[in-house]
Image (cartoon, grey):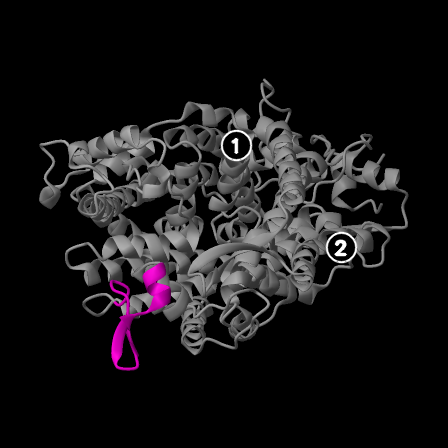
Amino acid sequence: MPKNSKVTQREHSSEHVTESVADLLAHEEPVDYKRSVLNVTGETWDKQKDGDEELDAENRPAWNSKLQYILAQIGYSVGLGNVWRFPYLCQKNGGGAYLVPYLVLLVIIGLPLFFLELAVGQRIRRGSIGVWNYICPRLGGIGYASCLVCFFVGLYYNVIIGWSIFYFFKSFQYPLPWSECPIVKNGSVAVVETECERSSATTYFWYREALDISNSISESGGLNWKMTLCLLVAWSLVGLAMIKGIQSSGKVMYFSSLFPYVVLVCFLVRGLLLRGAVDGIMHMFTPKLDKMLDPQVWREAATQVFFALGLGFGGVIAFSSYNKQDNNCQFDATLVSFINFFTSVLATLVVFAVLGFKANIMNEKCVVENAEKILGYLNTNVLSHDLIPPHVNFSHLTAKDYHEMYRVIMTVKEGHFKELGLDACLLEDELDKSVQGTGLAFIAFTEAMTHFPASPFWSVMFFLMLINLGLGSMIGTMSGITTPIIDTFKVRKEVFTVGCCIFAFVVGLIFVQRSGNYFVTMFDDYSATLPLTVVVILENIAVAWIYGTKKFMQELTEMLGFRPYQFYYYTWKYVSPICMAVLMTASIIQLGVSPPGYSAWIREEAAEKFLFYPTWAMAILISLIILASLPLPLVFILRQFHLVSDGSNALSVTYKKGRMMKDISNLEDNDETRFILSKVPSETPSPMPTHRSYLGPGSNSPMEMSSAPNGRYGSGYLLARTPD
């Protein structure tokens, strides 16, 4: 080394000898993180490229305010599943008892993994592809798998928004078009449409007027032009919200995130004033404690937690990457997670209040129909008038009087009771009828709204809420595609967004043919569940076990200015990976035990019938799962066997400000490690600059923070001794 070098001068001076790169750099003028990073990619330093990356970092869009960011995360995580999936699971799995496993799993799985995605996005300031390439290049397929799953989910999710748009425009008329069965002419006689008469007005409108559905997935039936037009409107709305980036979509979030809460509160107030609403609420909060011991309940609760927060899609990482480095993402994770939970509870209260009202209406209808049967039996002397209690008045028959009469007839006519065809008309039976997904939104809820005063107003509000919930989630889903692709391949944002929306619309035409609803069911059940579970497990392993929980906690300490709770250390390292592995195993077993199938609407029978997927549909189903998971092993193999470069075979340390460059090529692994970390070859160089290794929970050793500023990133440097 030349005698006039700074290091030599300091060695011959009385000053403290510099022993690490961090100490050496501390004597230099303040530098930006991007210019001082230890480059372990193996690429030579390119001044032009470095300048471009710096400009890209400086020009990266940012949220206008913390409120805008929180609303965006809430709008993304709170979606249609909160309104129709959570209430269904609550009803199916024991009412109030279901809330216990859900809350437990939210705390031990949902919250830690949500915080993990927020933290890596904010720390690295890239989309899902860049983040996982940065943390562990061999697991870089995580980001590509997330993009593929986002694409699959976005394809069918926007179709549901299209359905809501169709119902929204149909709501501007009185009476509502699904309130009565249509009348058709059979020659000179006007009769009620047979399919509608055998089902119900709302069911008929959904399956025949809206979807014009075929009898099976094998019968295409051609395109439904009404739904094709609605799908085009839906993709246009998403494209307009995305085309200007987060500044535009952030402003959209002010409305799309807050409006659903206004509607839910209005529906709750109106619902509680309806007759029978209390019956529905009581049914919801009456716990069936035996259900808490059922493993299936815990599996479904874990799956709902997993999808409710949008884990693994990349949208959480994308939104977080536009944050300031010192943003308190630990608080954000807790806030958004519990807002999501309370939104689900609020939506469940609304649904059960409305379903309680609907159950009372249907129960009264049942009483009237069966009372007419009894009157017929009395007039034909099938039943004796002595069986009817004297206080019963058929012109004002109550449910209580009917049940008393029913019990008497059942006791006396025990041997021939079934032949009478009388129903018990129990309110509990109506409340126990589980309705989920499209059946809840487009059949049960629409039927209840036909009995509301000013029903068109409530219908407009309800479907506008669904559109807003869908758009909020779609913006996050599309960000999970556009942000990593734009970050990685530097394509033009506007061109890529428009192209992506057009391509998705064309591919999405499969969902708006007459058999399209069956494809929506297929994609909803199988395109995301298993691949996303694998993606999130690998995310957890990449950070907690490959990169290192201690190292990651140390960097969060530097980024946030305080040490995250020890709770996250243990959940990231042990609890969450184990729980996710159990969930994945249970999902695979469930796939094997229950052969894939779907509920088809049979026009001639005017009823649903469960059918198994044909061979070609099974091939599509399996292809979806394989295609979504394919980037994981593919990228690993390519980088493991050096078929594509990940920078693992060379190392260059570049210090631009001090004009110091040390290139080391063709070194043995131990030599590389020794250069960076002195004589501790067991530790792997961190791609993120750090100080001392975090000693884990309970460590009494104070953190050694560098006083040298690092621009806007506020991170320190890796303690690295120079070679002897």
Whole-angstrom CA distance, mark 2 to mark 1, is 33 Å
Query: What span is in magenta?
Result: 177-198
Q: Percent from the top left, x then y, of residue 36? A: 66, 49
Depth check, front residue: 206 or 589? 206
SS under mark 1: helix
Q: Percent from the top left, x then y, of residue 119? A: 54, 42
Q: Residue furthest front?
A: 381
Q: Percent from the top left, x then y, of residue 304? A: 49, 41
Displayed quadrant of residue 54: bottom right
Depth check, front residue: 139 or 37? 139
Of the residues under marks 2 and 1, which one precedes in the sequence? 1
What residue sits right under mark 2 in the picture? 635
What residue sits right under mark 1 in the picture? 298
Residue at x 27% of width, y 29% of height: 412
Left or right of residue 686, residue 711 in this image: left
Q: Is residue 214 magenta?
A: no
Query: Height in image: 466 above or below 227?
Result: above
Q: Percent from the top left, x then y, of residue 92? A: 43, 38
Depth check, front residue: 21 or 270? 270
Query: Height in image: 231 above or below 720?
Result: below
Depth check, front residue: 175 or 459? 175
Q: Residue furthest bottom?
A: 187
Query: Which corner quadrant holds the C terminus?
Result: top right
Residue at x 47% of width, y 45% of height: 308
Query: Which corner quadrant holds the N terminus?
Result: top right
Residue at x 76% of width, y 51% of height: 633
The number of numbered discs placed on residues in the rendered structure image is 2
Displayed quadrant of residue 216: bottom right
